[in-house]
Amino acid sequence: HSHLNSSTFVLTGVPGLEDYSLWLSIPFSSIYAMVFLGNFMILHVIRTEPSLHQPMFYFLAMLASTDLCIGLSTVHTVLGVLYGFMQEISLDFCIAQSYFIHGLSFMESSVLLAMAFDRYIAICNPLRYSSIITNDKIMKIGVAISCRSSLLIPPVIIRLKFLKYCRPHILSHSFCLHQDLLRLACSDIRFNSIYALVLVITNLLLDAMLILISYIMILHTVLAIASREERMKSLQTCVSHICAVLVFYIPIIGLTMVHRFGKHLSPLVHVLMGNIYILFPPLMNPIIYSIKTHQIRRRVQRLFSLKAV
């Protein structure tokens, strides 16, 4: 097993544009800077503004924390490849990174589900909202989300350590994904494939279905409200969440499709989809919430006007 443990994997930057990688590092660095600044700003605003100390924004803080961690777990390899100081990565490091990427992906999905549940109670059961969604309940939901995201994945991730990788050690992204490592293995990968599929169905797919159901129920309630203004006001609180859900699920579906059926597509498409998958949600969520949620928008404007003075 000694040669396995010392094995390294080559990270792929942007195929065909290797000569331009320093130029490409400028937009990528900017995107990462925006991911960190945007999510940090959301957390700062929620922490320092007493009027935002309410359940909806506690869940948003969970989302921003998850997005910050997604940025932190990939920034060194993605920028390392572009800047040219990180061409390859050890198996252990690769396994650790894939654990964080997939775990945080499940975490984001769980937080979006918790946010859907929060909106559902707020709109369909407003009188009991404060007694159902208490700070204690939010803590419990937070702990449940952390356990669900961190404890279900280790069986497949640990197993990656004991597979034999006989195909050329070239990854298709500038970061490590479970399905990408499986592609290079020539041991029996049935356990990993099946377990991973079950995880995706019981996490991502189930969450997406439950989010959909909660919105059907929200719409049902909202359409029963007499006045148009009230209707719009109720739905307004959901718009940013719906955008966050789309921004999260569409890249996942896209990447899955590309991995499953896109064998004939150019490597550029794979790399592009992979980057959208890890960078689009953490980049867009702070923007969506800053624009769409008036409490946060006002606070962010105040933050910037202070700096301008």
Image: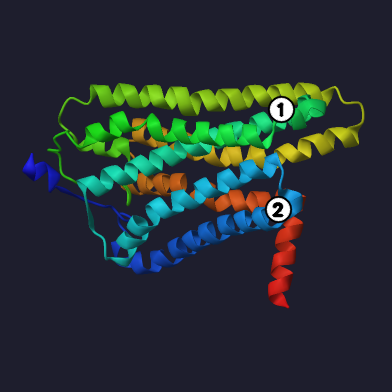
Q: Residue at x 42, y 49 (%)?
A: 275
> Is 74 left, or right, of 283 in this rendering?
left
Point out the tag, 1 or 2, that comes first from the N-terminus: 1
Q: Which mark is residue 132?
A: 1
Report if the CB atoms under discs 1 and 2 are less than 8 Å apart: no
The amino acid type, in three-letter code, at marker 2 is Ile
> Is 73 left, or right, of 84 in this rendering?
right
Q: Position of residue 213 (x, y in %)?
A: 64, 21
**Depicted 19 relative to depicted 176: above or below:** below
**Depicted 215 relative to depicted 83: above or below:** above
Q: Nearer the viewer, residue 255 or 207?
A: 207
In the rendered image, the residue lying farthest to the front is: 136
> Is 238 left, or right, of 112 in this rendering?
right
The amino acid type, in three-letter code, at marker 1 is Ile
Q: Which residue is mark 2?
A: 291
Q: Quadrant of residue 29?
A: bottom left
Q: Nearer the viewer, residue 79 or 167?
A: 79
Q: Nearer the viewer, residue 70 or 59?
A: 59
Colour option used: rainbow
